[in-house]
Image (tube, rainbow, N blue to C red):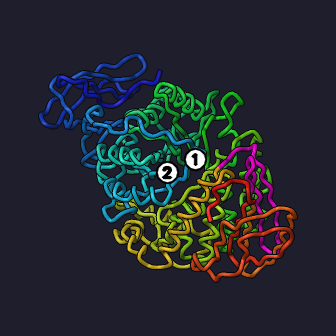
Amino acid sequence: MIKALGARYLGDKRSEFCVWAPSLEEMSLRIVSPSTQLVPLSKDERGYWRTVVDGIEPGSRYFYHFNNKDLPDPASFYQPEDVFGPSCLIDHSTYAWKSKNGHAIPLEEMIIYEIHVGTFTAEGNFKGVISKLNYLKELGINAIEIMPVAQFPGERNWGYDGVFPFAVQHSYGGPDDFKALVDAAHALKIAVILDVVYNHLGPEGNCLGSFMPCFSDKYKTPWGEAINLDGEYSYGVRNFFIFNALYWFECYHVDALRLDAIHGIYDMGAKHFLTELSQEVDKLSLRLSKKLYLIAESDLNDARVILPRREGGHGMDAQWSDDFHHSLHSLLTGETQGYYGDFGKVDHLARAYKNGFVYTGDYSQYRKRSHGSVLNTALPRHQLIVCSQNHDQVGNRQYGQRLTSLVPFEALKLAAAAVMFSPFVPMLFMGEEYGEESPFLYFMSFFDKGLIEAVRQGRKNEFKEFAWEGEPVDPYELQTFQRCKLHWEELNVPAHKTLLLFYQYIISLRKSSPVLSCCSLQDFLEIKVWEDKEMLKVTRRHGGSEVRILFNFSRSINLFSWNHPGESWKLILDSSDQRWLGPGQALPDLLAGEESISINPLSCVCYERCNSRPDVIP
């Protein structure tokens, strides 16, 4: 049984408070607003402290008092005065949901769009995101992934330095505004995926260790102390984070959680934390009569992440494929620094298409060891999320450059088609659909000067393996954050508007084509590589539908021999068409028998077999 934590309003001006602190001998609740009082708590045999207080209503603010100090609730639902201020009692039952428990969108049908709330709009809050939902709907997006909203210090941060996992960031608008965003998205049949962090906590304002043995010195993470999931008292730590996951599903009606960097979640116990988490989420799915999803970020290429629990896996519904991104990025940019040194051939992308991962037990030159495992051939392809850009791959560059700043316009369209025509679930990073030119840099607004300087130096050290020239941008400067805001006025520029229309078109192709939209393992998938020409052919077949997709990653025109006697094929995409501001060429609208066609540099061409479906988009 998962124990509930935090403060709950019971009605009739009565509220219950619960906190886990197994090692403390005494603790009190200090109410500081609207009146002041000190209330003792009682401790049960497992270390949970509770009390019910009369006369306390939503909006009241409080601390826990022990060892002659006041600290916020580690399971605070709201921190309106930032990380060092009092916690605020809220009543989740008062929000009038219009969409009830959301609109269930199957994972395999999702077109995901990743958003950082603070930089997505000029407003930098949940209301700003709401104002763009109709735009996303018209683009073809049916799932938004929100980067972490758990309370962090200050007003600007990526969100991975959060220290109150249950509290919605005050500078974004707080709990009700986040619910309004979820509600508005569901009204448009857009699912909401929330990014959560269970591998570490941020360095400033982190009070969990004062209450509970939350951290472990057995393991190390690149971001801070590892979470204690398998040591003494780990039962309460596990309960804390599993309850957190269920909380977002129940109280905020999110449809999925994206679990940050699970390779930093260490657990040597008999039942891994992720296995227990997926088990509890499945129970909640049954209770709510709605499939709830867990999506893992992992750089391990470990098939166990998405294997069902009955087969010894963790039972995650999907995971990101870094290999797909790295393969595509290195082909487009020619970069070989750092981890890109393991990629750079067309064959790498071909292997990503075929196997999901490139490294499945192969030797990695970058890692100096064998890396990855073979995905179970019975696993559906929709269990992998792929992209050409995301917050990590853009933001962890020294100057935060998007692909727009790194490759020609034609390559942006080629990248989009490579992702959207893959047999996996596609994800876009905010602004990529129109070629946003602003960078996405790392930024933060910590209060401690020593910590700010440590972060500055840490960022410099991270960039050394890439041998980038110059000095990193100061992550603390307000201007750094402001530079990352999207420039929506770029949509008035012809090239940006055309790229948006191109994305809209290929998303509609994916949705309308039975073969492009299907991620089933039963579908036929054939890959052919011409390394010398830097070309890739992908053949996909589903039922009676079939497509041939040609990718030319070279800077030269390539001739391709079409040899399908007795069949007719209709052109459904040429990314180099003048319609898309390309160089244009006379590719035939129909192909039959044996012909040679010219494929423009950095372009994607897609033909669909005629009569495979009656509604081929012209």
The correct choice, above or below, for 206 with respect to 604 in the image is above
> Which residue position holds label 2?
142
Q: Could you tell me if residue 342 is visible in this image?
A: no
* CB within 8 Å, label 2 to label 1: yes
Magenta stretch in the rendered image: 518-547
Would residue 52 be found to the left or right of residue 479 on screen? left
Q: CA distance from mark 2 to mark 1?
A: 8 Å
Amino acid type shown at disc 1: Glu
Residue at position x 53%, y 63% in the image: 504
Q: Nearer the viewer, residue 447 or 140?
A: 140
Q: Nearer the viewer, residue 486 or 80?
A: 486
Would residue 467 be found to the left or right of residue 395 on screen? right
Residue 545 drawn in magenta: yes
State the quadrant of the C terminus. bottom right
In the figure, residue 33 lies in which quadrant? Answer: top left
The correct choice, above or below, for 107 with respect to 113 in the image is above
In the figure, residue 22 lies in which quadrant? Answer: top left
Residue at position x 21%, y 37% in the image: 61
Q: Position of residue 312 (x, y in %)?
A: 70, 31
**Can you tell which mark lies on residue 109?**
1
Residue at position x 70%, y 63% in the image: 327
* Circle nearer the N terminus (2, 1): 1
Q: Position of residue 43 (x, y in %)?
A: 34, 19
The correct choice, above or below, for 1 with respect to 505 in the image is above
